[in-house]
Image: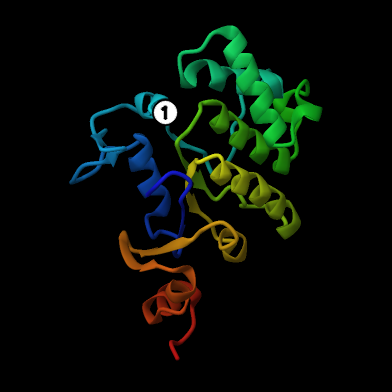
Amino acid sequence: MSDGDAVGIVGPNGAGKTTLLSVLAGAFPPSAGTITFDGVDVTGRTAAERCRSGLVRTHQVPKPFSGMTTFENVFVAASHGHAASRDEAYERVVDSLSLCGMLGVANRPADTLGLLDRKRLELARALATQPRLLLLDEIGGGLTDGEASELVETILELRRRGIGIVWIEHIVHILLQVAERLICMDAGRIIADGEPKAVMSNAEVVKAYLGGTPA
């Protein structure tokens, strides 16, 4: 992947999509092989070390720090993602909240936010760490098409800033607004990889993921 590239990952439940992101982000060790990021072997690095190098993930179910405001949640990420002065961290928080459309709820307790704003907060926290490659795990899950479309605009802006995207998503038509390359997984293996339209019409993908009969 190059800066600003976007790869979508689809597949049936249990295909191993979230496990893949967990291995890339450092939550789980790989059973074999190595993980290379920007030409450097990061297999032995912790999740925190990978985050500081720019490899950052979001989670399918947002879990903000309870008892803290939206601003404070993002400030924690800005302070720990990279070494930064308090002023630098503050600037990152404001930029992240602004990009994610959350300045208006910056002082609200994070645990009172609705689902869309919790998803935005998850994205803002990741952005505040200054990612170079962002791993998104079903950030559209549970949202309406309209709400998910709002997140798409933010993610497209991240691409314009040169941030690479690897995005797992079941709302495929939303995913395809961002991804220029699509991977389909099934039972822990890649069954198709390429241009999105070609992948979605692949006979094995139709059978394993779309539930239809190949033409």
Q: Quadrant of residue 128?
A: top right
Relative to 84, 71 lies left or right:
right
What amino acid is at disc 1? Answer: Cys
209 vs 167: above or below = below
Q: Secondary structure at mark 1?
A: helix
Residue lying furthest right: 104
Residue at image point 59% right, 8% down: 86
The picture quadrant where one finds residue 191 is: bottom left
Q: Residue at x 64, y 51 (%)?
A: 152
Q: Position of residue 57 (x, y in %)?
A: 47, 38
Residue 212 is at least partly visible in this image: yes
Residue 85 x %, y %: 54, 8
The residue drawn where x is 73% and y is 51% is 147
Count how many numbered circles sit on residues in the image: 1
| Residue 10 in view, yes or no | no
Image x and y of residue 62, in percent:
59, 37
Q: Is residue 188 left or right of residue 69?
A: left
Which residue is depicted at the point 41% across and 24% down?
Answer: 52
Q: Check the image and name the residue furthest to the top.
A: 86
Coloring scheme of the render?
rainbow
- Outermost residue to the left: 32
Q: Nearer the viewer, residue 169 or 14?
A: 169
Q: Position of residue 143 (x, y in %)?
A: 69, 52
* Disc 1 crowd, CA 10 A, few/some/many (<14, 14-19, 20+): many
Quadrant assignment for the C terminus:
bottom left
Residue furthest toward the bottom?
A: 215
Which residue is tagged 1?
A: 51
